[in-house]
Image (spheres, helix red, strand yellow):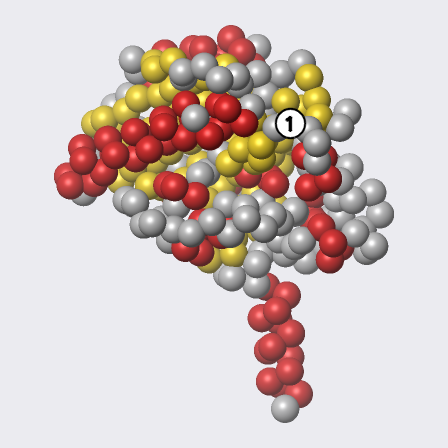
Amino acid sequence: MLLLLHVLMLSLLSSCSARVVQDFESECGQFFANRKSPTIFSDSQYKQICQTLNNNVYYATYYDTHNRIPVYSAYKFEGLKDCKRLDKWYIEPQLDDTNKSPSMEFEKDVRNIIQGLGYHQALSRDYIKSKHDRGHLEPVFQANSQGCANATFTLTNAAPQDPSFNRGQWRKLEEKMAEKLSNQCLPKKYNVYIVTGVVPGNNTINNRVNVPSHFWTAYCCLDNNNKCKISGGFIGVNENITPEEKPTVKDLEEKLKDLYKVTSFKLFHSSTEP
């Protein structure tokens, strides 16, 4: 009986987990083309999260604890699964208390346990009366299972998004991209990798959470030789404006390099660059 209780306790502690890790590539590299992550910055404000739910790792998120928004989420696309929306949002306790177990939890369940809760991340209350949606980076629409769809509902996978943009042009883009990948890449048994991110802007909600100036997304379809055969990207101003399509991933990388003010910004790695 004691052994059974011990096993049960371990199960409860490990379920609904989202692990903050030191090395993306070794911990959840399956979501990156050729297991090499997009650009990682050297500053300590950025954290690497393997987004996990019920012991299943579904995608990876690179999180900015200063701006309290993700830089990007990386995931694989495996076709449209008609997943349902959870509409219940988790937070990541490890970002505010490194001694916490790696469990994605509801804010109400840890509010009185963690001192400084929300110091390194957005909370649900930040979005109240903010006039912004919690815009998914990995969207429910492109999730590869219902479990994955549920796991997208963490605030570490969301950033303030203009409601008209989120529910209009950006949603249409997600659908259009999924249709293209379903028709052109999956029938050829290509492995489809997607990275979706944001660029920090000059405004905040609740004087805490940065409102991105841009949302962007890119895809790469790898063949059996790990060559990127089909790729592309989009970037849109965080307003109700149609996202701009970039002819190549390199074009998008150049745009992101300028917006992030860095010497280079890499999205995918393949034996033949997209």
Q: Residues within 10 Å of mark 1 (few under 14, many from 20)?
A: few
List x then y, in percent, for residue 141: 38, 41
User: Which quadrant is the C terminus positioned in?
Assistant: top left
Three-letter residue code for mark 1: Lys
**From the viewer's perspective, is 83 left or right of 23?**
left
List x then y, in percent, for residue 86: 51, 52
Q: In this picture, is 258 found above or below 178?
A: above
Residue lying farthest bottom? 1
Number of numbered discs overlaid on the protein picture: 1
Q: Residue 251 occupies which quadrant of the picture? A: top left
**Which residue is drawn at the image coordinates 77% and 25% (left, top)?**
207
List x then y, in percent, for residue 273: 29, 21
Residue 113 visible in rendering? yes
**Which residue is drawn at the image coordinates 50% and 45% (left, top)?**
152
**From the viewer's perspective, is 73 left or right of 10?**
left
**Which residue is drawn at the image coordinates 51% and 31% (left, top)?**
72
Q: Residue 117 occupies which quadrant of the picture? A: top right
**Which residue is drawn at the image coordinates 58% and 71% (left, top)?**
11
Secondary element at tag 1: loop
Q: Residue 112 occupies which quadrant of the picture? A: bottom right
List x then y, in percent, for residue 62: 55, 34
Q: In this picture, is 117 found above or below 171?
A: below
**From the viewer's perspective, is 45 left or right of 172?**
right
Front position in the image: 69 or 126: 126
User: Which quadrant is the N terminus positioned in?
Assistant: bottom right
Residue 33 visible in rendering? no
Front position in the image: 269 or 184: 184
**From the viewer's perspective, is 253 left or right of 6?**
left
Q: Which residue is mark 1?
A: 131
Front position in the image: 78 or 257: 78
Front position in the image: 254 or 158: 158
